[in-house]
Amino acid sequence: MNIKAFFPLLVFLLTNQIIIAQTIQPQYQKQVEELVNKPTIQKAFEYIKSIDDQTIKDMIFLTEIPSPSFHEKEKGLAFAELLKKAGADTVWIDEVGNIIGKRKGIKSDKTILVEAHLDTVFPFGTDVKVKQKGDTLFAPGIGDATRSLSVVIALVKTFHEFNIRTEHDIWFAGTVGEEGLGDLKGMKHLLREGAHPLAAHIAIDGGGLEDIVNGGIGSLRYKVMFKGSGGHSYGAFGIGNPHNALAHAITAFVSKADVFTKEGPKTTYSVSVLGGGTSVNSIPYESWMLVDMRSESQEKLKGINQLFLTAMEEGLEKENAIIRSGDALKLKIEKVGDRPSGMADPDSPIIQQTMALAKFLSGNDPVLTSGSTNANIAFSKGIPAVTIGKGGIGGAIHSLGEWWINEDGYLGVQNALLLVLMQGGM
């Protein structure tokens, strides 16, 4: 594996738990070889290469449209227009802002979802103008996940150019609310109870082709606030101090969580943001924090969640026990994020197909990983799902220095095309 091919994998190694490499079953390797040798696929592969420059232009165009979580409308409308021009049969915007372009299947008895998320972590006012230095494109959000959106557009163009019709309907989508406090809003809506059933979900949001996400790292996120009356630091001394309660709560939680997370599946916790108070000579009227807890195991996530909630009550009780005057402090706990965990069986068809494709196209051994992506929802519900790479190489995601290089980027489109055909039934 050359160093550039290794870089996307290194990013995953730093942030995800690697699962022991699995054997690719021969029948899936044969399936890939037979599909690739079809004349239509050979022509489609050449077509994907021929439109590569336009795919990059689409990526740059979409990157330069700001789209913080909860504010994806402008980019969504632009993406919808690209879907229409690319050849989607119908395009619509659902109730939460997801953009969906449908290619009708021959049987239409099932629906396969192929999607990339519209939102980025960057607030309005961030300079998202794409800048090029040599072979490298720089812009916040260019890799996560605007490159993936351009892959979706290239897929629709390819289907339309060769009038490829699968047995099942294919939904090509740009989804909202994947990042941060967006909390997988778009996918939760698409997979809500009573929604149109999806037979499989292919998320385009990974690194290299060999980096295959088949597990969802679940997370729980809270905003905790201790509230009191506030007052002068000398004149009102003796009233409840929300900062004290917060400190007691953090201390109680960390001591328990430290022991709890030393054994079993990897489970993490972080007190991430703190706030409250008005001046050095004032007892604050509120003290708040944002907390993030994660695990591949839903049971471990439930366990640390209970420790957390108990510790918050302990913090409140300790401070209220020493109040000399005034009313007792109050505690407000708001859940601001809930991403379920789950795992796709390495021997399941969708994962075996993805591994076989990665090996065939990249020449590298596939590596199964766990991450926090839109596929978490499908994983948790037992729906066949996988998160695949977007092609090219990139880095510094979620930073102002985010970059992407078009090194064999077309392979990301070819990989996605084959997986969609294998799942959709060519």
Image: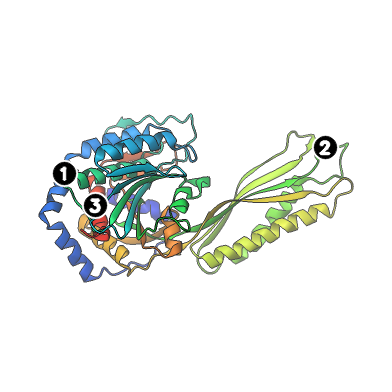
Relative side of 328 to 224, left or right: right
Q: Mark 2 points at which residue?
A: 231
Check if mark 2's residue and mark 3's residue have beta carbons within 8 Å: no
- Circle 3: element type: helix
Q: Mark 1 points at which residue?
A: 47
Relative side of 419 to 326, left or right: left
Quadrant hosting residue 80: top left
Q: Distance between the residues labelled 2 and 1?
A: 70 Å
Q: Where is residue 230 in the image (x, y as percent from the top left)?
A: 80, 39
Q: How far apart are marks 2 and 3 (CA)?
A: 63 Å
- Circle 2: element type: strand
Quadrant hosting residue 311: bottom right
Q: Give the quarter of the figure containing the N terminus.
A: bottom left
Regarding residue 252, the answer to whether it shows in the image is no
- How many numbered badges does the structure rendering display? 3
Other-residue count near label 2 (Cα within 10 Å), few / some / many at <14 / 14–19 / ≥20? some
Other-residue count near label 1 (Cα within 10 Å), few / some / many at <14 / 14–19 / ≥20? some
Q: Position of residue 179 (x, y in %)?
A: 47, 46
Tell me the amino acid under the disc marked 2: Gly
Relative side of 251 to 180, left or right: right
Other-residue count near label 3 (Cα within 10 Å), few / some / many at <14 / 14–19 / ≥20? many
Q: Name the residue under label 3.
A: 417
**Which of these two is toward me, 282 or 126?**
126
